[in-house]
Image (cartoon, rainbow, N blue to C red):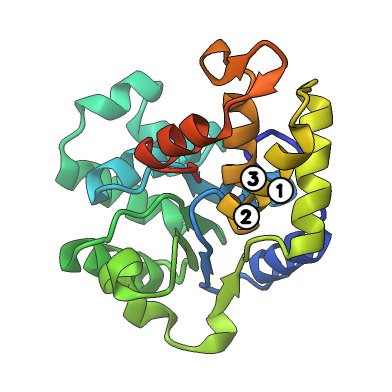
């Protein structure tokens, strides 16, 4: 899914589209590498008033990102406060928060917080304030719906109707996707069939993991003439921490 094209995900894409269209807060979750960010970005272009925060590591980072998005959307309050995006960095955290909160009340915005990092109680309090002050729905994106990933935001998405899960591919779809990636990357080898089977086994259907291993198999380090060195590749893949989001 991190290859830039969406493979067999139309149903999931429509679900995200429907959640955003309802303008209600929801939690989008799934394992790292499953393609959450790619799916989100493919839908967000249809929703001009959705403010997307790619980095949601801290409240300061989030409010800075929101200010930038509001300025690009020509929010009157943001335009009055900032000459340009460079001026955003000159504002204190308190001042920036106040400007953003006022701007959110100007029209019906929605917010997407991607790449959460186990948000703290203070972070969750800030999100609650956003949702309450301007009645602004906030979508959170995490690896799971559990506390270790959603942190103190978990309580905001307690209802099943507020959750949208993106799962790894089933066996058949994973095989088709892996074959597609092998073809797109022009990968070949006298043990390509064995490599394909191992990729499917090792990845457990995770598209990001499939892409990573297929790309690794192109490196000279994992080639011996026309042979893919599967075991060293897999060991290095595991030591590297696996797929990204």
| Residue that appears at 70% across and 60% down | 169
Residue 62 in view of the camera: yes
Residue found at x 62% / y 38%? 2
* In the foreground, 1 or 224: 224
> Where residue 12 sits in the image (x, y, percent)?
73, 64
Give the class, few, some or many, for how many residues have Cα within 10 Å of label 3's Cα (few <14, many ≥20).
Answer: many
Q: Are marks 2 and 3 in contact (CB under 8 Å)?
A: yes
Q: Are marks 1 and 2 in contact (CB under 8 Å)?
A: yes
Question: Is 143 located above or below residue 196 in the figure?
Answer: below
Q: Are marks 1 and 3 in contact (CB under 8 Å)?
A: yes
Position of the N terminus by quadrant: top right
Q: Secondary structure at mark 1?
A: helix
Estimate the x, y position of residue 49 in percent, counting from the top left.
61, 51
Which circle marks residue 199 in the picture? 3
To which residue does mark 1 refer?
197
Write down the residue under mark 2.
201
Q: Position of residue 146 (x, y in %)?
A: 36, 75
């Amino acid at each position: 899914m991190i290859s830039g094209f969406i493979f067999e995900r139309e149903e999931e894409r429509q679900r995200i589209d429907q959640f955003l269209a309802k303008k209600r807060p929801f939690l989008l979750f799934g394992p790292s590498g499953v393609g959450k960010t790619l799916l989100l970005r493919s839908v967000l272009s249809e929703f001009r008033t959705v403010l997307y925060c790619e980095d949601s590591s801290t409240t300061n980072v989030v409010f800075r990102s929101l200010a930038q998005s509001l300025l690009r959307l020509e929010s009157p309050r943001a335009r009055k406060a900032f000459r340009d995006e460079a001026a955003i960095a000159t504002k204190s955290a308190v001042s920036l928060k106040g400007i953003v909160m006022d701007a959110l009340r100007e029209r019906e915005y929605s917010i997407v917080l991607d790449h959460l990092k186990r948000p703290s109680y203070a972070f969750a309090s800030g999100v609650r304030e956003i949702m309450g002050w301007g009645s602004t729905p906030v979508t959170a994106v995490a690896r799971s719906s559990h506390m270790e990933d959603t942190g103190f935001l978990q309580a905001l998405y307690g209802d099943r109707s507020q959750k949208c899960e993106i799962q790894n591919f089933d066996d058949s779809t994973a095989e088709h996707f892996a074959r597609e990636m092998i073809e797109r990357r022009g990968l070949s080898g006298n043990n390509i069939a064995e490599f394909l089977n191992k990729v499917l086994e090792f990845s457990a259907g995770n598209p990001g993991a499939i892409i990573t291993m297929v790309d690794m198999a192109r490196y000279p380090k994992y080639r011996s003439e026309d042979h893919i060195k599967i075991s060293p590749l897999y060991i290095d893949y595991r030591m590297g921490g696996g797929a990204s989001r």
